[in-house]
Every structure is written in structure tokens, then in C-alpha cells.
Amino acid sequence: MEQKKLSCVSALALNSIFGFEPKFSHNLIDSLGSAEAVFLMSDRERLELFGPYTRYLARINDSALNEAEKEYDRLIAEGYQVLPIYDEDYPEILRDCPDAPMALYVRSSQPASSIFNHGSGIAVVGTRDISAYGREWCRRIVDAVSQAPEKPVIVSGMAIGVDITAHMQALESGLPTIGVLPVGIDDVYPRRHWGAAQRIAESPGSALVTDYPPGSTPSAVNFIRRNRIIAGMSAATILIESKARGGGMITARLASGYGREVFALPGRIDDIRSQGCNQLIREKTAEPVTDLAALPGQLGLGTYSPRRKEDIAAAIRSRFSGSLDEEELERLVDIGTSIRKIRGISFDELCRITDIDYAGISRYAGLLESEGIICIDLLQRCCINTNFQ
């Protein structure tokens, strides 16, 4: 096996063995000088180094190296990329963390050299149970940083709620995004985000990454291990919404522990989804996000230059004047302005406010969504997209 490949395969083997305790791998490399040196030792040397009672001794052998080589060959043949920690394309900011993964698996249409170490990573994380308030402000925050002179990379965890909202808004705003998976690189979790994952992998400067070997399935502990990569890859973390206990809180505290900046979107005192954000602000662990114009500067991205946003009524009249009669056009304007006034308004509430039946609301809302003026979630709650006043 050529030296470069041996070095990479050895890192994969160590990652598989010590994945949940990467500091063991770091200590071994510090002691022996390289990852491959661990597997070049004789059985006697390993016994002297580890002692007879370690649970890892039986796993550090030629078989582990052979399995890692098979995995490496298959991944490369299928178009994936593998980055050992000492590779020049490995994210430098992540490498600085004491528990950095020994290796990263990468899925992208572009080489790792054009993805990592180009601009600041900004983690945007939070609850799966996102509110209409959280969804709107997540989009507005990502859109705001996309207008800064220095373009960041949006990093998140591909989960439903805040994560996928941040990823998709990044792409809509022209930013690259990195999705960190809690499963192997040959899978996506949750499966409903397979299409979104494909879009990310094919977008310029974007990628899916994980430190889990192929075939790994999701379990509770996987998400904590995933969260440290999100925090470690990012110069700053923004918590959108979170309960007092949740994955977003874990990521924010990991980021703080790494010495990174942490921001949180304040919320209502009585909203369970804002308890975590408010707690971090109260503890002074996080800076509150209270001014979009100031946020890019706080993140070190330069002065915010907001785009002029379209007036929603004018936008609706402009886009539908040739396809709807005047009466229908005014109904559409009424629906659009109602959605603008009441964030997260449901179809039922729109029926009551506009005196239009459910079928009509469904049709009109579909027209607005098809033009990118509003978005509708699975519960049929409506919000205005970020480009409109």
C-alpha cells in the first residue's frame, strides 16, 4: 500500500476504533508519530503500550486495517472523499478542537480543497419543533449574513426544523452550506431530507460530512458526537430556538467551550421553544440577536448591506395581473397582506379573516407559494418569504 493511502486508511481505522473517544487517537499519534505507526507495532509492543486489560487492544490489528482499506477503496470508487485529520484540506478550525475526528467522510460534487478553509463557518442550529417566529427569523438571519461583504458557510445538522430551514435558506440566498450527518456518508437522516441532501451535495462550495463509517445508523449518542463537529467547524454559532434541554443547547455550549462566539435569538418568556435561548442570554453565554443590521459586523463579516425588499401587494399585482381578473387579484392581495401581518397564520384563520372558503384559500395560497412569495409548512401555516416587506 502506498504511503499516502496507508496514512489515510490508518486514520480511518483509528476513527472506527476510537470514534467516540478521539483523544485516544490523538494521544497515540502524539506518542508514536503517525497513525500508521499504531498498526505497524508488533503484538508485544501493543501490549506494552496499552496493557493487558484495555478493551481496545484486540481491535488494533491487521484485520482493522484491512477492513479500513476495503472501505476506503469502495468510497473512492463511489465518488466520496476521505479527509484524515492531517490532510491539508481538513477544516483547520475543526482540527484545533481537542476532540476533533480522526477522519471526515465527505460527499460533494467538488473537491474538498474548494469547500473547506474558505471563509467563516457560521452554525445555525435549534429545535426540530420550530415555530413560525423561529422559521421566519432563521431565514432572515441567514439572508442577512448572505448580504455581508465576506460570505460565510452555513453549517447545520440536516434535522427537521431549524437545521433544514437554515440549509435551504443558505442555498436560496446564494451561500454554501455544510450538512453534518449523524449517520454514515452513504445515508441521510432523516430520510425525508434525501432530496435536500442531494441538492446540498451538488451546490457550489457545499457538502455533506460525517465522521461515522458507512452503514452507521442513528442513535441518541450519535447526535451529540455530530453536534461537536457542527460547533467545531464554525467560528460562531447562532441558536434560533431551543428548549432548556436540547441538541441546539448542546451545540451552543460546545461552541462556547471551544472559545467560539455564541448568539441566540431571544423569544417570549412563556414560550418553551425559547427557554434555551433566553437562558444562554441570561447566563451571558450568548449575545442576543436584536439587530440584523449589526449582526454581520458582530460575526466579523463586514458591514451589512440590505437588499431592497419588494412590497408584497405590488409584487402580487405585478406577477398575477395578466392571469387573474381584478376581483381575484384583490383577493390574492388580501391574503398576502394578511399573511404578512400575522406570522404563521393557518388556512383556517385566513378563511375567517378573508371570508374565503377553504378550497379558495388553498388555491390562492398555492399560487403565492408557486411564485416564491410565501412558504407553507406541513401544518398549513403561512409565512412571507424574506424578499418581501
Image: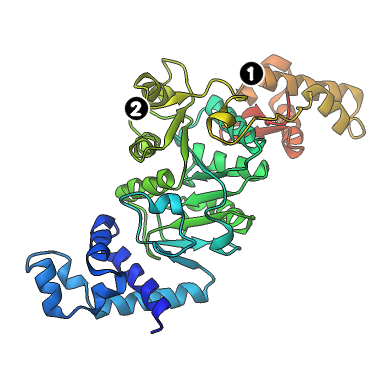
Q: Is residue 92 left or right of residue 324?
A: left
Residue drawn 41% across the image and 15% down it: 270
The amino acid on which the numbered mark 1 sits, given as a three-letter code, is Ile
Q: Is residue 205 left or right of residue 56?
A: right
Residue neighbourhood size for the residue with mark 1, other residues' Cα within 10 Å, grouped as few (<14), some (14–19), many (≥20): some
Please say whether residue 359 is visible from this viewpoint.
Answer: yes
- Foreground residue among 10 and 63: 10
Report the residue marked by disc 2: 244
- Foreground residue among 261 and 225: 261
Viewer-nearest of discs 2 and 1 = 2
Looking at the figure, which quarter contains the N terminus?
bottom left
Q: Is residue 49 left or right of residue 123?
A: left
Report the residue marked by disc 1: 342
Residue drawn 69% across the image and 15% down it: 353
Please say whether residue 161 is visible from this viewpoint.
Answer: no
Question: Residue 330, how many percent across, how many down?
Answer: 84, 21
Measure the alpha-carbon separation of dots 2 and 1: 27 Å
The amino acid on which the numbered mark 2 sits, given as a three-letter code, is Ala
- Foreground residue among 282 and 214: 282
SS label for mark 1: loop
